[in-house]
Amino acid sequence: MYDIWGFLLQTLNVTGIAVLILTVKALFRDKLPPKWQFAVWSVLGFMMLIPAGIFGRYSLFRWQTAVEIVKSQFGDYSFTKVLHPLPIIEEIPQTFADWLFAVYFLGVIVFMIKYAVSYLSLRLVLRRGTEPGAEKMSRIKSIAEARGINLCRVIEAEGLPSAFVCGIIRPVLAIPSERELDEKVILHELFHLKNRDTLWSVIICALRCLHWCNPVVIYCANRALNDMESRCDQYVLENIEGEERREYGRILLSMANERFSKTAGSTSINNGGKNIGKRIENIVRFKQYPKGMGLVSVCIVILLAFPLVIGVKADSLIDLDSIPLTLASARSTPCTTPAGAFDTYAKAVMVKNGYYRAMCAPEELQDDILNEMLQTQKWEPGLDGYADSQKGYYIYNLTQVGDTEYEALLVLDYPPAAKDDFSGGLALQNLRVEKENGRWVAIPLEDFRFSDYSGTSLSNGDSDLPGLIYSGEKNNMKVEFVIQTVHTVENTVTDQNDLWFLSSSHYNTVPKPNTDFTGGFRSNYIRYYHTRSESEKWSVSHIGLSTMPVYEGEERPEALAVPKNNAAYSNFTNSVTGEQCISKQLLGGWGPMITIEGGGGSINPKKKVKLPEYFAADLYINRKKVAELDLLLQKGGAE
């Protein structure tokens, strides 16, 4: 946590889980044993260590929406993130929110120092202690041996209200020198020793320090410590009977003392008078629980923990009838995948929705989006008209350019009537999607440009659209091997009808910020250019090319397959090696260039597209091999 908003998000998330656990505990108060009543707090403790909103997932409620709404009132439109549960101050406070976080941070330090001083003070008291006499030691050893508990070092000291265990690594069992040794009390502390409760007390106090200003967490910490004591009380009561149980309650009342009641790392932490009274109530209600309840208890803890840990992803914004508040909701619905950012941006453009844009916009643009929508009540992506929202969008030439950066060409169906000065039907824009503070954001690399639409299926590539170009030149011939990839997200929704033949489908324009690509296609084609005189160009009547992809670390193949030069057109691809042989007879002569469709096929949309370092190629002119080429990827990626 680096700011007060991160702490607010974390502590709100913890509060919701704490209330749930308190409710569940109330329902099972008399039905499950104290061992479970204490164990269930481990769910809360674990969730306190998991950053709220991690991976865009939330437990119980989308607390981030509330946090973003509060932040917007301070003019802060950054994305609230919790990378870890520990507070860290990176710079000198500047704003009111910074100073609030500094106060919270100071409180954490003060409470930690308080517990540390209390523990050191108790250790100083124990240093004056001495080993008990032989008779006492013999009785304590016999109690421990009878229960199969490994005994630690034992000392007795003056001024102790009762026996307790102190220390984690080298624990000590401390007993008061002024009191008679009571076996029930010793047994209680030995059960603490067996269950390493001094360690649990430190963990509980550390988590209490992290949320010192949250009364719900403080209450739960006190309950957890009391449940820890009640668990050991239950163990003792199961080993004694009748009058001894009533006597045990009287002993507890006599031990009520606040002197060391807040010392972490010891089992004296919960011996305050109020907690003693609650323990007496539990003793009065004592009952034996069936052995099978242990398994039931474990199952309940797992069933409670699993959905809280997994959580749910925020996949839609909340319309709050207010532009600033709805935008705050949009910021609390982050894009958790690169495909989700592409999908959300494309749909924001198609329907010109500023809230969708805020879901995938970098922090530096959030203020601009708010001001634009407040002034005009809308958001404009740079298109005069509307793209055809029922034709969808396509992501061409997806390329990973960094550890957390992707670039691609967004292709939208844009009807000619939407633009007066061009006759085409496609709107194109190069995009970058990158990770910013735990969320994926979309950044346009250019204004929209427009292109003619050839009418082919855009999901299978289009030679009129840009691709990744590998090129080489020799013997007056320039060769370009063009690769296109197309990634899509399934957005078609079928409207069910009782009469199946009346069912219809439509394109879903609601963003999917957590989606992955569901469809992928890779195609390639070859372009030839003759670079010399017209007479030389017209002397070429047949062209052939053999290519083999060469990936980083591989050696160039010694020989390539020979195209079928005796055919008017041939196209062969080895699906294993990627080797491809294409030849074509030029029946109609030359134009500025000659394009030969290469081929293509489906690709796994969830795998990274692996591009070759270069293509090894053999060039054939008029059925004779005239050159060996290395087709290199042009700088700048897609054309």
Image: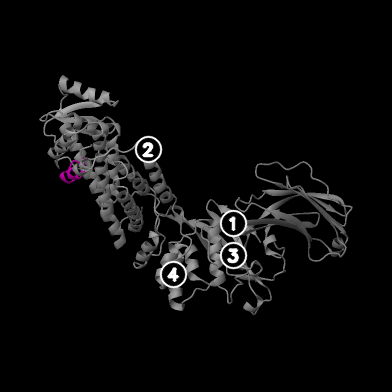
Which residue in the structure is indicated by mark 1?
517
What residue span does the magenta drawing correspond to? 269-278
Mark toward the viewer: 4 or 3: 3
Report the residue marked by disc 2.
Answer: 292
User: Counting residues from the N terminus, which is met first, the one under dot 3 or under dot 2?
Assistant: 2
Q: Mark 1 and mark 4 in contact? Answer it, CB < 8 Å.
A: no
Could you tell me residue 166's position as x and y percent? 23, 34
In the drawing, does residue 496 fall left or right of residue 270? right
Crowd class of label 2 (few under 14; some 14 to 19; many from 20; radius 10 Å): few
Instruction: Give the x, y percent position of residue 35.
Output: 31, 39
Q: Looking at the figure, which quarter contains the C terminus?
A: bottom right
**19 w.r.t. 148: above or below:** below
Q: CA distance from mark 3 to mark 2?
A: 49 Å
Q: Position of residue 277 (x, y in %)?
A: 17, 44
Whichever of labels 4 and 3 marks the residue nearer the N terminus, that label is: 4
Q: Mark 2 or mark 1, which is nearer the start of the sequence? A: 2
What amino acid is at disc 2?
Gly
Prevailing secondary structure class for the magenta stretch in the rendered image: helix
Q: CA distance from mark 3 to mark 1?
A: 16 Å
In space, the residues marked 1 and 4 are separated at their CA atoms by 27 Å
Q: Secondary structure at mark 3?
A: strand
For the residues labelled 4 and 3, the Cα–Cα distance comes to: 22 Å
Q: Answer yes or no: do the residues labelled 4 and 3 have beta carbons within 8 Å?
A: no
Q: Which residue is mark 3?
A: 493
Residue 369, labelled with which disc?
none
Kind of residue at badge 3? Val
Task: Check disc 1 and report its element: helix, strand or loop.
Answer: loop
The residue pinned by badge 4 equals: 319
Is disc 4 placed on a helix, strand or loop?
Answer: loop
Q: Pick the residue in front: 416 or 604.
A: 604
